Image (spheres, rainbow, N blue to C red):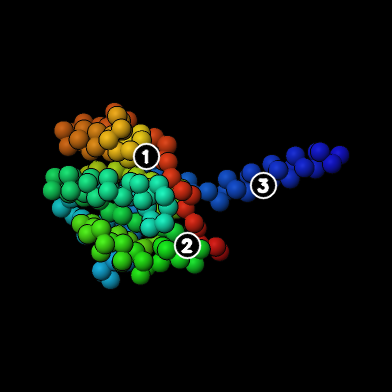
Amino acid sequence: MKNVFLLVLGALFVLASAATLPQGYEVGDYVADFKLRNVDGKEVSLANYANAKGLIVVFTCNTCPYAKLYEDRIIALNKQFAPKGYPVVAINPNDPSQQAGDSYQEMQKRAQEKSYGFPYLQDDTGSVAKAFGATRTPHIYILNKEAKGFKVEYVGAIDNNHKDAAAADQKYVEEAVGQLMSGKKPKTTSTKAIGCTIKWKEA
C-alpha cells in the first residue's frame, strides 16, 4: 500500500511539474510582440526591428557557466549577421532575487565590460521567456521576418560544443541564418538547448 501511495504521489509531482513548464513557440509559429527594458534604460520591442530581415533571440544571463562559455560566440554572431539584417537580441530571464549576479545593475556592468553591440534586456518576471518556451541559458530562437510578423525558424543550441567554439563542427545558428539569407528553410530546425535552468520568479 505504501508503494502504491508513493507511486501516485510521484506521478502527481511529475504532472504538476510538467504543468508549470513553459510550452511556448514551435517552429512555424509567429511571435507576439513584447516590451522589455534594455541596459541603456530604453524599452525595446519587436516593433523596433521593422527593417530587420530576422532576429537571433538569445535567452542568456550573467551567471550561468554555459552562458559565459557562449558569450563571445553570441557577440560574434551579432557582428557577423547584424549587418546582414539578422541582429542578436539577448534577454536575461533569471529572477534577480534568486541570482543577485543577474540584477539589472550587473547586467549593465557586463554589457559595458564586453562592449555588447546588441540589446541586453531584462525579463525578471520570466513572462517573455515563458511565452517563447525557453528553459535554459542559453536558449536560441531564430526568427524570420514575414508579412505577418516574426516567424520561428529554429529553436535550440548555438552549436554542438559548449566547451570549445573551435571544436564545434555543427554551427546550428550560423547554418540556419545562412540558409534563411539564401531564401531557404533551415535544414536543422530544432536541437536540444544546453545550459543552466532558468531561475524563474516565484509566484
- Image disc number at residue 13: 3
| Residue position marked by numbered label 2 in the rendering | 99
| Residue at the limit of the structure toward the right, as seen here | 1
- Could you tell me which secondary element the residue under label 2 belongs to? loop
Q: Residue at x 18, y 48 (%)?
A: 79
Disc 1 residue type (three-letter): Lys
State the quadrant of the C terminus.
bottom right
Residue 94 sits in quarter: bottom left
Left or right of 149 on screen, residue 83: left
Q: Residue at x 64, y 44 (%)?
A: 14
- Image disc number at residue 163: 1
Q: Is residue 133 visible?
A: no
Disc 2 residue type (three-letter): Gln
Q: Residue at x 75, y 39 (%)?
A: 7
Disc 3 residue type (three-letter): Phe
Mark 1 vs mark 2: in front:
1
Mark 3 vs mark 2: in front:
2
With respect to residue 176, does 139 lie above or below?
below
